[in-house]
Amino acid sequence: MLSAAAILLCFASLLHRNFSLHDQVHHLRGQLGAATAKLQSCIVVMDSSLDMSSAFSDQSNDEFVPSRSLKNFSLLLSLSALYAPIIILKYIDLLSRLRRSRGSEDVAFNKRLAYRVDIFLSLHPYAKPLVLLVGTMLLIGLGGLALYGVTDDSLSDCLWLSWTFVADAGNHANAVGLGPKLVSVSISIGGMLVFAMMLGLVTDSISEKFDSLRKGRSEVIEQSHTLILGWSDKLGSLLNQICIANESLGGGTIVVMAERDKEEMEADIAKMEFDLKGTAVICRSGSPLILADLKKVSVSKARAIVVLAEEGNADQSDARALRIVLSLTGVKEGLRGHIVVELSDLDNEVLVKLVGGDLVETVVAHDVIGRLMIQCARQPGLAQLAAADLMKLK
């Protein structure tokens, strides 16, 4: 606080010296004008019209010279607008400390203000650019007023000079005089801070966009695609069979959405090492129980929807599958394709079909595999026939 006061005192003394020099220059100009008028009145040889024109020009020049008091007022106004918020915040902070020392449990004003600013910047997406724009306009306005107080230029020219100092830090090299140099350097430093903040905002926006793409938060805009909800060990063989089926159609699109990281899913699919045969596999991270995530993968435009069972407890897996079917039936746009649900318990098949209606087809994988193994055990040649039929289906 003492260092800031010392810097402010030095700056005020320099400005006072600059004001005194400007006053002396203005006084000398007045004396020079009076001497010139006396000299012109003593010369009787000169033409009267020339005397009138010169007097009119001197009068017009005096009228267009801005008053010193107006310039001093503009400079003091810019300094007051710059230091008044700091002094007010310090005073309010001191009052809040005195209240807390007396036993009051009120939160400090600076903490409440910081909390409100944080809420404003986090809730509104355009808050940061708006704050940057307001800060830039204040810097240009206060800088223009300060330049108007230390130079002989007009207010419009000073505002334009202030903008040039903000836009390009090297423009202050042409400033002449102590006061204009101090003000121009201050505006240039503020301009560098403004452009650093703008660069930070642009960098953060680009980083957030790339991070969103990397984590699979972007929307999938596809039609007639196959949507797979969930993740299990059966996903590899399922993807392989769908790719073989899409080969005759010239390829297709498979969208996989699970509660996993997008990069992990893509890495696991790449490790499966099977030929996609022209089919594109797109992974997205999300929950099938959330309607917004389902819309993100264009669930209403999917040709077929496959719900994979979770590994672990059969009842929990089927309960989750039932909740997914309820979420799918709640899509307002409706479903174009049918739903294939993998269940772990045969007893839950009736309940899932009751909820899903005609769009739902259930597959109890353990029951189908168990029946097939029993039939193959009772009839030894059935296994070869089943394998041959499956090869024909491929």
Image (cartoon, grey):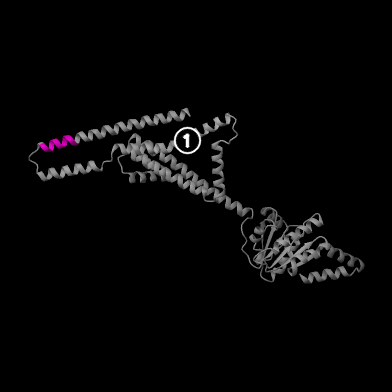
**Does the rendering let one see residue 150?**
no
Residue 34 among those drawn in magenta: yes
Quadrant (top left/top right/bottom left/bottom right) for the C terminus: bottom right
Residue 223 falls in which quadrant of the image? bottom right
Q: Quadrant of residue 166?
A: top left
Q: Quadrant of residue 182?
A: top left
Q: What residue type is disc 1 on?
A: Ile
- Residue shown at 76%/63% (left/top)? 341
Task: Name the foreground residue: 165 vs 20.
Answer: 20
Check disc 1 and report the residue beneath it. 88
Tell me where residue 349 appears, x and y as whole percent: 80, 64
Q: Residue furthest right?
A: 378
39 or 265: nearer the viewer: 39
**Mark 1 surroundings: few (<14), some (14-19) or many (≥20) residues within 10 A:** few
The image position of residue 35, as x and y in percent, is: 16, 34
- Give the magenta part as a residue range: 33-41
Front position in the image: 141 or 211: 141
Q: Is residue 71 left or right of residue 47?
A: right
Q: Determine the residue positioned at 81% across, 57% down.
A: 315
- Along the horizontal axis of the image, is 15 left or right of 119? left
Relative to residue 67, is residue 373 depicted above or below?
A: below
Q: Is residue 226 magenta?
A: no
Exactly how many numbered labels are in the figure?
1
Indicate the position of residue 328 as horizontal and vertical percent values.
Answer: 70, 63
Magenta region, main secondary structure: helix
Residue 8 visible, this orientation: yes
